[in-house]
């Protein structure tokens, strides 16, 4: 390696020093650390072998089709899909969900030519934001059905009431990300099937951990009426970002996600995913990890995750002023204030997350949400446990307990309701610049602001903030 090459990599290392740690179990969201260094090394070597491969055309690069087929067969087996189940390996859960929504829309249009009514996706209010994004991109109405604030989910009949002849897709989550709670998949799928509506199960988080999680009710492609499912290989599949699987049981529905064009003077275009040209590196890395682990490897890793999740649940249950929301199934927990104890005992989950972060563990704050029926999903803090959490369990447990002690009895932080006019709102550009300069962001304040402002207004502020945070430095042209 030349001196210049070393300088380039040293600069990258300097940039990386600003990042939260991706290994070691200290970030309880975004990263899914298997704890197996050899697995990471294998994934990196596999990715390097296909660095120059373009996934656009598997007829030119058949390795793309072969690796994808292996992954789809494995996913089909563990998610109990029928033999005709097809699908794709995508760049992540958002693309998998986007394609599932696209396929449902196109299939609806194919069977009702000329019908110009506005079409709908119906989902619990806890369904992932990717469904909202897909509806936005594809010109659909997103109908969110309120869940019970105590349980984090809903009765299937409540969602079924919103299914009509303009509904292209019904959605259930296994589990829903905000609270780690399983939706009533069987009931939702049955209601959808009765009305001839496809049902998608978002198992982006649970797809490669729930198959080996004891006590899980039916939730996958074995459930009658479930027509598609998404499962992320880069979550509990332990592959590097970004790789996800979309499985579709009906070949006609599966074909509806494709885009093909011959009406131009270039090469014939046929895209099974949103992307055209795409790297095969994440595909190869995921293929290597899944091939190396197999079902037995996933079962062993899941056993460790289940054990550490149970242990962390016991820690939280033993902290006065906090409670786990609902009855989560899987490695996700949402922790909120226990309203049954006096004010001086209560712990605000966002202040708690900040106190725990000071002890070296990054938790994820989730703002309160007023649902369509006026009920409120209280603010919570989200924890995702992984195999790497096993090695830091004692330290994590101590941080959760002492962090709660530090903030117990403090009044929850709320943003002042702004008066009329944009001048009363914080300047997102100034916030972004301060965050870049100091490396610190007052997340509880941001979350409190989101709770206070109309959601469309807070979303615009966040757009301005992130655009400023990621903007290149200004200078001479």
Image: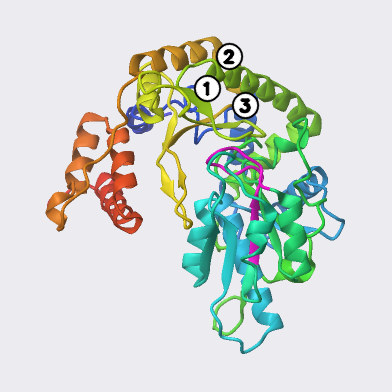
Residue situated in front as seen by the camera: 460 or 142: 142
Proximity of marks 3 and 2: CB atoms separated by less than 8 Å: no
Q: Is residue 170 magenta?
A: yes
Q: What is the C-alpha distance between the residues marked 2 and 1?
A: 8 Å
User: Residue 388: x, y in percent?
Assistant: 58, 21
Proximity of marks 2 and 1: CB atoms separated by less than 8 Å: yes
Q: Residue at x 53, y 20 (%)?
A: 316
First in sequence: mark 1 or mark 3? 1
Q: What is the C-alpha distance between the residues marked 3 and 2?
A: 11 Å
The quadrant the N terminus occupies is top left
Q: Residue furthest bottom?
A: 114
Of badges 1 and 3, nearer the viewer stands: 1
SS at mark 3 in the image: loop
Q: Which residue is mark 1?
A: 25
Q: Which residue is mark 2?
A: 391
SS at mark 2 in the image: helix
Q: Residue at x 73, y 69 (%)?
A: 253
Residue 50: quarter of image:
top right
First in sequence: mark 3 or mark 2? 3
Q: Which residues are magenta?
A: 169-183
Magenta: predominant secondary structure element? loop
Task: Say if residue 258 shows up in the picture.
Answer: no
Residue situated in front as seen by the camera: 316 or 238: 316
Q: Is residue 47 left or right of residue 404?
A: right
Q: Does 248 sit above or below residue 326? A: below
Q: Which residue is mark 3?
A: 34
User: Residue 436: x, y in percent?
Assistant: 24, 36
């Amino acid at each position: 390696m030349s001196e210049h090459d070393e300088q380039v990599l040293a600069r990258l290392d300097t940039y990386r020093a600003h990042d939260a740690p991706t290994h070691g179990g200290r970030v309880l969201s975004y990263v899914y650390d298997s704890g197996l260094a050899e697995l990471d090394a294998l994934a990196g070597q596999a990715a390097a072998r296909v660095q120059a491969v373009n996934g656009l055309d598997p007829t030119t690069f058949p390795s793309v089709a072969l690796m994808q087929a292996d992954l789809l067969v494995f996913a089909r087996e563990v998610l109990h899909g029928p033999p005709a189940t097809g699908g794709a390996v995508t760049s992540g859960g958002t693309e998998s969900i986007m394609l599932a929504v696209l396929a449902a829309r196109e299939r609806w249009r194919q069977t009702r030519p000329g019908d110009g009514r506005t079409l709908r996706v119906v989902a619990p209010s806890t369904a992932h934001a990717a469904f909202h994004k897909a509806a936005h991109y594809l010109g659909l109405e997103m109908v969110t059905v309120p869940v019970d604030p105590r349980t984090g989910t809903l009765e299937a009949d409540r969602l079924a009431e919103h299914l009509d002849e303009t509904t292209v897709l019904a959605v259930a989550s296994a589990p829903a990300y905000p609270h780690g709670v399983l939706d009533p998949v069987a009931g939702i799928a049955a209601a959808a099937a009765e009305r001839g509506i496809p049902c998608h199960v978002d198992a982006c988080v649970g797809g490669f951990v729930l198959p080996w999680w004891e006590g899980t009710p039916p939730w996958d492609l074995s459930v009658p009426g479930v027509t598609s499912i998404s499962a992320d290989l880069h979550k509990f599949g332990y592959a590097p970002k970004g790789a996800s699987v979309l499985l579709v049981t009906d070949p006609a529905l599966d074909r509806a996600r494709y885009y093909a064009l011959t009406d131009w003077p270039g090469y014939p275009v046929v895209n099974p995913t949103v992307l055209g040209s795409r790297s095969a590196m994440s595909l190869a890395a995921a293929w290597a990890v899944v091939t190396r682990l197999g079902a037995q490897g996933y079962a062993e890793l899941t056993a460790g995750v289940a054990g550490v999740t149970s242990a962390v649940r016991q820690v939280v249950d033993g902290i006065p002023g906090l409670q786990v929301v609902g009855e989560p199934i899987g490695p996700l927990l949402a922790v909120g204030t226990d309203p049954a104890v006096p004010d001086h005992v209560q712990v605000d989950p966002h202040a708690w997350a900040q106190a725990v972060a000071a002890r070296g563990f990054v938790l994820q704050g989730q703002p309160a949400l007023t649902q369509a029926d006026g009920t409120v999903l209280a603010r919570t803090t989200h924890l995702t446990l992984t195999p790497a959490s096993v090695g830091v369990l004692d330290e994590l447990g101590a941080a959760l307990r002492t962090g709660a002690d530090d903030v117990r009895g403090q009044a929850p932080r709320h943003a002042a309701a702004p008066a009329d006019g944009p001048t009363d709102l914080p300047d997102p550009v100034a916030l972004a610049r301060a965050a870049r300069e100091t490396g610190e962001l007052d997340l509880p304040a941001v979350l409190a602001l989101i709770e206070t402002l109309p959601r469309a207004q807070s979303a615009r502020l966040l757009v301005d903030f992130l655009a400023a945070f990621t903007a290149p430095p200004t200078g001479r042209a």
